[in-house]
Image (cartoon, rainbow, N blue to C red):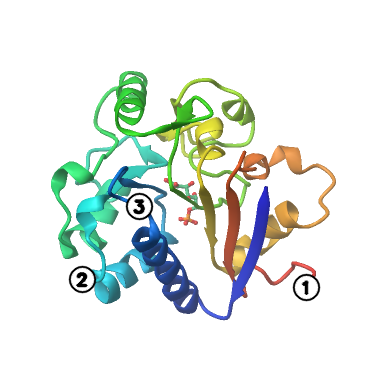
Amino acid sequence: MKRSLRIFSTPQDLAQSLALDLIRQIKEADTIVNHFTIALSGGNTPKLLFSVLADKFSGTVNWKNVHFFWVDERCVPPEDSESNFGMTNEVLFTKIKIPQENIHRIKGEDDPIKEAERYSKEIIDFTVKRNGLPFFDIMLLGLGEDGHTASIFPGNEKLFLSDKICAAAVHPSTGQERITITGKVINNAASVFFLVTGKNKAAIVNNILGEHKNKKQFPASFVKPTDGRLLWYVDEEAGALIKK
Ligand code: 6PG
């Protein structure tokens, strides 16, 4: 596994640089054969990246070749303020020319177990396979202060060993139901990006990238791409405790 860490002085610089890297990868990818597949995370941190893509790069890519999926979703309707799809649609998709059929959303309004099965089938039917598993060009991950990523929370690390493609989950402190892509599919991607900003994440970033004795309690520490690259993009505040 190739792992790299880039620390940016501001979240804006990070979003600009990551947007450039994503656009470059989309352009370099041979989309004649296969579509370029990106699985997105939700939460607050990706909003800046999505607005930079919409404001600065909407016309520089043929979005017809790009298919968007979600790493996880909250079990709420798409118009709900908690919806990861809803946020991305408002900040990005309504501002770029992308065919509706390229947007593969998780139906958070449906029964979590049934939707996890349905979405697994949609992923299996659409993606190419590598190592017998669905293959994504890009996985965009976030990081919770408790070390969760996607909707794989502490105590649920077994989702990194599961043969399921997607699973239902529950947020340990809010009780919110979630649907998440599982660990083997995350680790099967070509490029796995962690996008992390803010001083509230400094301790957990250092726990995972530093010498913490018991990293295994943090689900994000299980993100180790099988053949792909692992790229940490953090701002100075989130990277403040990492020994340079
Ligand atoms: C979600 C996410 C989740 C997120 C982290 C960080 O749906 O909430 O996909 O894994 O990436 O919770 O969230 P913030 O970016 O809001 O800190």
User: Relative to residue 95, is residue 162 drawn left or right?
Assistant: right
User: Relative to residue 211, is residue 85 drawn left or right?
Assistant: left
At x 23%, y 57%, the residue is: 63
Q: Position of residue 142 (x, y in %)?
A: 51, 53
Marks 3 and 2, how far apart at CA: 19 Å
> Of callouts 1 and 2, which one flags the residue occurring earlier in the amino acid sequence?
2
The residue tagged 3 is 30
Disc number lying in front (3 or 1): 3
Disc number lying in front (1 or 2): 2
Question: Given the image, on which type of amino acid does mark 3 rest?
Answer: Asp
At x 36%, y 59%, the residue is: 26
User: Relative to residue 176, is residue 190 drawn left or right?
Assistant: right
Query: On residue 244, which mark appears?
Result: 1
Badge 2: how crowded within 10 Å, few (<14), some, or many (20+)?
few
Disc number lying in front (3 or 2): 3
Q: Nearer the viewer, residue 198 or 68?
A: 68
Marks 3 and 1, how far apart at CA: 37 Å
The residue tagged 2 is 59
Please determine whether, in this image, residue 194 is positioned above or below residue 120. Answer: below
> Of callouts 3 and 1, which one flags the residue occurring earlier in the amino acid sequence?
3
- Where disc 3 sits, the SS reads loop
At x 65%, y 43%, the residue is: 224
- Where disc 1 sits, the SS reads loop
Badge 1: how crowded within 10 Å, few (<14), some, or many (20+)?
few
At x 38%, y 55%, the residue is: 29
